[in-house]
Image (cartoon, coloured by chain):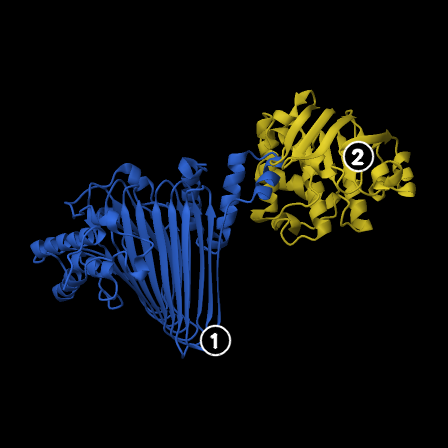
Amino acid sequence: MLQINGLKASIDGKSILNGIDLTVPQGEVHAIMGPNGSGKSTLSYVLSGREGYEVDGGTATFGGQDILAMEPEERAAAGLFLAFQYPVELPGVNNANFLRTALNAQRRARGEAELDAVQFLKLARAEAKRLSMPDDMLKRNVNVGFSGGEKKRNEVLQMALLRPKLAILDETDSGLDIDALKIVADGVNALRGPTFSALVITHYQRLLDHIVPDRVHILAQGRIVKSGGPELAHALEAGGYAAFVPEAA
Amino acid sequence: MSIAPSGPLAALKAAADAYVADYQARKTTLPGDSHVRAESAALVAANGLPGPREEAWRYTPLRPFAEAQFKPTAKAEPSAALLARLPQVEATRLVFVDGRFHSELSGVPAGFRVTTGEPAYGTLARPAAEKLVALNTMLAEDGAAIHVPANTDAGTVLLASLATGAAVGFHPRHHIVLEPGAKLTLLDVTIGEGEYLNNPVLTFEVAAGATVTHLRTQDEGAGAFHLSTVYAEVAEGGTYDSFALILGAKLARMEVHARLAGPNAAAHLNAAQLLGASQHADFTTIVRHDAPNTASRQTVKNVLTGRSRGVFQGKIEVARIAQKTDGYQMNQALLLSANAEMDSKPQLEIYADDVKCSHGATVGALDADQLFYLRSRGVPEAEARAILVRAFLSEALDPISHEGARAAMEAAIAAWWAKGGTVQT
């Protein structure tokens, strides 16, 4: 599904990614763990097409397509979704309208019929209920006045409605209490299946107790330094990053 | 010793003299109060037009206006395209074409009175203080006098000005009176084609407990000059509630004088200016709190593209007697191109000691994080920009309670965006 080879990227001339090699097959959930400054968020932004990042080398393909050459909205329509570490507030934009605009833009780009307001609301209310989100979160402005947990749930709601082929979750666990963490994890787990892949980026092992990954990769200094099964996360939790990142010791 | 004026001042003087000459040639045929008219003619002859050295006009030079000469024309018919731009709302229509009342396009009021055929001068305008008002008073030929009796809801009136272009100049003069407890929603739409001058003056007398909602759409032709002045005097417990959508004209100035004359009177002077190419639009307000417990609200939003220039000047004057005044003023500009410019000048003059007055001004570009957030959800860039621009305007648009008017304004904004509001970087 996602194939990254030798990916190098920099911001303002400063090298952040120094040759990432990573493959996430269809239907698998992979976790990327790493200390602060290892390049976790940069990887998610480069893959989703945020401006300001310079790709200095390597390739990234998604379902065989060169995603680095695509606009952010084209990547989204192709099935890529980024759950933001810090979801952005959109004052003056109604959450339900935002979600419907996004969903219909993607459907349009894929040549599918758009949903009308009634069809959409029925769908959105059902998904919101599954995430224990009050209905009024759909009526409020996007993320404005939302608590940290509500913002993250709103990200998962978007993911549930947009049904991506690959979701990148950028520290979705940060700022969540255990109840919110479980709700978010349940939301992700509900999407798991043969046509859904995810890249779960996290600093802590905690989230991975609830979203159990097929593979775990350790990112340090812009490279994957170790890959393994779910047990790798536990080893990290016990021994810290020092065992895998000599310089951090 | 006097020095002969040159440059812009000479052009303004020549233009004023030409307008006075036009008045002199036609004064015996002009309708209405010839005495009021003659007084203003003397003012125009003596004072001329506003010049760049006047503080109130330093951001809005009238030289481009002074370089053209605009005259009234014979009766003209508006094109079908122009008529189609009128909002489709349930309303009593009062249609003026090139400044003259057009009875066949207009409706008949029920429950309130409308008089046309001559300027409705009223008593609130101050031609000695405002030079364009003197020009209007001198040359006004027609207007609507709208009178809403006490405790009567006149519903919605569509006051439309259609201009057919071809260097026509007109100076409509409307006077609106609301007796105690009366209500009126006035949709004030000024549209046209080509190059012309629209210099209207509207005066509102809002009696105790009366409410007038004044919803304005200025969508004049691309070569037009729109120079309007509004005076509103609000008595105890009355409200002058206005919103102006400013889209058109080459050079526009909307000046609003609101006086809160009785306790608990309120004025809302909200506006949205959406400008592109080399348009220049100036929204100037003077709110005078002359009684205790009065409130004024101003939310003015500007979206500027191309080489356009937006101006906001907002003055709040609080008299010594006007304790517990609540004044709020916010001016925000979204610059969508590097060559657009916003000039903002708030002024507070407060003589009472127990008041709450706040003002603020911001200028910025579209937020890159917000844009990326929308695009990362699959919304194409142009649509994402349109969503963020509309969101920026919502604080000024959302308080409009008249659904038909708001829908018409939303459509006008969407059309503006579709035809050229897109970013020119």
Give neighbour class at mark 1: few <14, some 14-19, many 20+ (Cα, 10 Å).
many
Give the percent coordinates (x, y) of residue B105. 25, 46
Residue where numbered disc 1 is placed: B324
Where is residue B268, by image quadrant?
bottom left
Q: Please state which of residues A92 and B160 is positioned toward the viewer in this rendering.
A: A92
Residue B216 visible in the displayed image: yes
CB contact under 8 Å: marks 2 and 1: no
Give the residue drawn at x 13%, y 66%. Answer: B35
Secondary structure under the numbered disc 2 in the rendered image: strand
Give the percent coordinates (x, y) of residue A113. 58, 29
From the image, state the color of chain A.
yellow
Q: Please state which of residues B237 and B278 is positioned toward the viewer in this rendering.
A: B278
Where is residue B175, by image quadrant?
bottom left
Give the residue drawn at x 36%, y 55%. Answer: B283
Q: Please state which of residues B158 and B392 is positioned toward the viewer in this rendering.
A: B392
Shown in blue, the chain is: B
Give the residue drawn at x 61%, y 32%. Answer: A72
Give the percent coordinates (x, y) of residue B407. 44, 46
Mark seen at residue A219: 2
A162 to the left or right of B312: right
- The disc numbered 2 marks a residue on which chain? A
Q: How many marks?
A: 2
Q: Nearer the viewer, mark 2 or mark 1?
A: 2
A78 to the left or right of A210: left
